[in-house]
Image: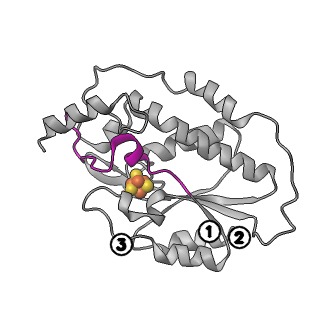
Amino acid sequence: MQKAEMIARRSLLQGSVAAPLAVAGRGGSRQPAPGSGFREQKTRLVEGPQVKRDFTKDGRSRRVVFAAHCMLNQNARHVDCADFPAMMKPMLTALQAKEIGVIQLPCPELMALGLGRDRDVPPLETIREALELPEAHARLMPYVDQVVYQIREYLFQGFRVLGILGKNGSPSCGVETTFYSSGQGPGEGVFVRLLKERLKAEGLDIGIKGIEDHRQQEAIEWLLKRV
Ligand code: SF4
């Protein structure tokens, strides 16, 4: 399918909640900027009656970590970018050995731009640029809210949230390194930045570490120090 056809198809799908975000141009309709309407949604999500329960009397470890989606599912990756058939085994083996529950983060690129996303999203140049559009932020912020909501729930009920594992080098999930139009470099991915901003605004101090596909040991050691 030609790129122009793909863009037109995405535009047709834009009305559907489940459809990938159309990124056909900078002149299209705009969603509320971060910091305006999002705050109302956050308030609805994190407030409400809560009952504190005793979770110490069954078999659960009461330890959890949030992990980049593709750590457990490489199928979400950009075409030609999956380094493993399914999972990042060394990290997941370490998590299993320490009985740490894994909460899979959403794949921001999949949820905003689709599984068949392009690296150069015309008329933009990169996935990063597409994710910085207000429409993309509007698509991603509910996922940020859902992550923060879960963190609050686990903490309130006395669980240990050991950290958040991003994926270094990603324009979306990078923590120490990310991807720019000029290539890989120091910095954060868009989703990680939005998540960190929200965590800070909520006063939540949760450690965040990026994992490397072929150098997972550093992130494993970081996490194990927190167990
Ligand atoms: S790094 Fe993030 S955006 Fe990229 S495939 Fe993994 S979860 Fe999706």
Q: Amino acid at mark 3?
A: Pro
Instruction: Say if residue 167 shows up in the picture.
Output: no
Q: Which is in the foreground here, disc 3 or disc 1? A: 3
Dot 2 and dot 1 residues touching (CB under 8 Å): yes
**Callout 3: few (<14), some (14-19), or many (20+) C-alpha neighbours within 10 Å?**
few
Q: Quadrant of the N terminus?
A: top left
Q: Which badge, 3 or 1, is on the more N-terminal residue?
A: 3
Is 67 left, or right, of 11 in this rendering? right
Q: Which residues are magenta?
A: 104-123
Q: Quadrant of the C terminus?
A: bottom right
Picture coordinates of residue 155, whole percent (x, y): 76, 52
Residue bearing the label numbered 2: 227
Q: Amino acid at mark 1?
A: Leu
Does the residue tagged 3 have its C-beta within 8 Å of any atom of ligand 1? no
Picture coordinates of residue 135, whole percent (x, y): 40, 29
User: What is the distance, in whole Å, between disc 2 and disc 1 at their CAs?
Assistant: 7 Å
Residue at image point 37% right, 28% down: 15
Residue bearing the label numbered 3: 85
Magenta segment: does it hold 129? no
* Numbered label attached to residue 223: 1
